[in-house]
Amino acid sequence: EISFLSNPLYRQQALDSGAGALIVSETDLKFLQGHAQSAKTSYLVSKNPYASFAKMAQWFAKQSASIYPPGISPMAVVDKTAKIPASCHIGPFVQIGPGVSLGERTVLLGQISIGEGASLGDDCLIYPNVTIYHDCVIGDRCIVHSGAVIGADGFGFAPDFSSQGGQWLKIPQTGGVRIGQDVEVGACTTIDRGAMANTMIGDGCKIDNQVQIAHNVVIGIHTVIAGCAAIAGSTTIGNYCVIGGNANFAGHLQIADRTTVSGGTPVIRSITEPGTHITGVFPSMPHSAWERNAAILRGLDKIRERIRDLESKSSDSVTKPD
C-alpha cells in the first residue's frame, strides 16, 4: 500500500500506518526517521506530497480504467449531419442532434442528449443521463457526471404588472455555454445558458455535485466550487478561487482572483482584493473580522447581563430632581 503525509498533525498516524510506502516532505521525513517504527517503511520525498499522491493515483487508475471500444451503439440516434470521429464511443440510447461535433476519443455513455450545434472536444467523458443543450461548447478532456444539465434556459423573466394584474414575461435566452479544457462537472449540476452573451467556465475548473450556475456567470481558470453552491446571474468569479459548499452569491458581483469563500457563506457584495478569505453565515466579512465577532457572539448573553447590571446601578446612583 502507498499513502501520503501532507499535514504534520498526522505524523503519529503516519508512524502507525501499515502502508509499505509513504509520500512525505523533507521536513516530515526527518521527523519520521527519528522513530523506530519507520524502519519498515519506504519513503518517497516530494515538495508537495498531496499532489504527488494525486498524480500517482491517476496513474494507477488508468491501469484499471474501463476501455470503451470505438463505435456507435445501434440503439443510439445520431443525426446524419453530426460529425462523429471513428475513435468515439457512443453508448445506447444516446441522442445526437444536427450539426453536433465531437472530438477524437470522446465517450458518451447511455441515455445522453446532445442538442443541435453543440461541440465537444477530444478525450471527453460524459456519463449517463447528461443533457447538453444546443449550441453549447465543451473543451478537451472534460468530464461531466450523471444528471448534469448544461445549457438550460437562464432564469430570466420581466415583470409586466398593473393594479389589475399581469404576468411575468419570459426573456429568450439566446446565449450559450462555453466550457474550457480539463473541466469536471459534478452530478446533477446545472449550468444555464446566457441571456445574450455566453455563460463561461474557465480551463481547469472543478465543479462539485448539485451546483447552480446561472446565466451569464463567468468563472475564471482553475477555480473549484464545492457541492450545493449557487451563483446568481452575471456574477464574475476570478481565477484560482475556492468556493465552499453551500456558499451563495448574489447577482452582478465581481469576485477577485484567489478568493476563498467558506462553506455556507452568503456573498452579497463584490470582493475586490485578491486573496481575500471570507466566512460567515450572516452577510460576509473578512475572515479575521468574522473570527473576532464569532468569539463575541458566543458571549453575548453574559455581556447583556453585565450591561443590564451596570444600567441598574447607574440608575440607582442618579439623584432625581425635586
Image: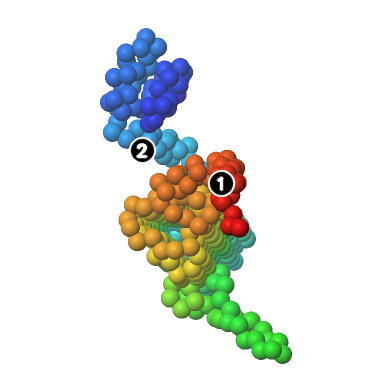
Residue name at image x 31 percent, y 28 percent: 25
Q: How many marks?
A: 2
> Which quadrant holds the C terminus?
bottom right
Do we see residue 190 in this rendering? yes
Residue furthest front as drawn: 322
Q: What distance separates the C-alpha of mark 1 from that of mark 2?
A: 67 Å
Residue name at image x 48 percent, y 73 percent: 194
Q: Is residue 291 above or below residue 241?
A: above
Q: Is residue 130 above or below residue 290?
A: below
Residue 317: image tag? 1
SS under mark 2: helix
Place of residue 41 in the rendered image (x, y in percent of width and height, measured from the top left):
38, 17
Task: Tell me if mark 2 has few (under 14), some (14-19) or many (20+) residues whose alpha carbon lies within 10 angstroms of its own.
Answer: some
Residue 44: image tag? none
Question: With 217 as the anchor, is 131 left or right in this view?
Answer: right
Residue name at image x 44 percent, y 44 percent: 292
Type of amino acid at the residue the image marks with label 2:
Ala
Q: Nearer the viewer, residue 249 or 176?
A: 249
Q: How is the image coloured?
A: rainbow
Place of residue 181 in the rendered image (x, y in percent of width and height, measured from the top left):
38, 58
Q: Label 2: which residue?
A: 51
Q: Is residue 29 above or below residue 55?
A: above
Task: Tell me if mark 1 has few (under 14), some (14-19) or many (20+) residues whose alpha carbon lies within 10 angstroms of its own.
Answer: few
Place of residue 285 in the rendered image (x, y in percent of width and height, measured from the top left):
44, 54
Type of amino acid at the residue the image marks with label 1:
Ser
Place of residue 278 in the rendered image (x, y in percent of width and height, measured from the top left):
43, 51
SS under mark 1: helix
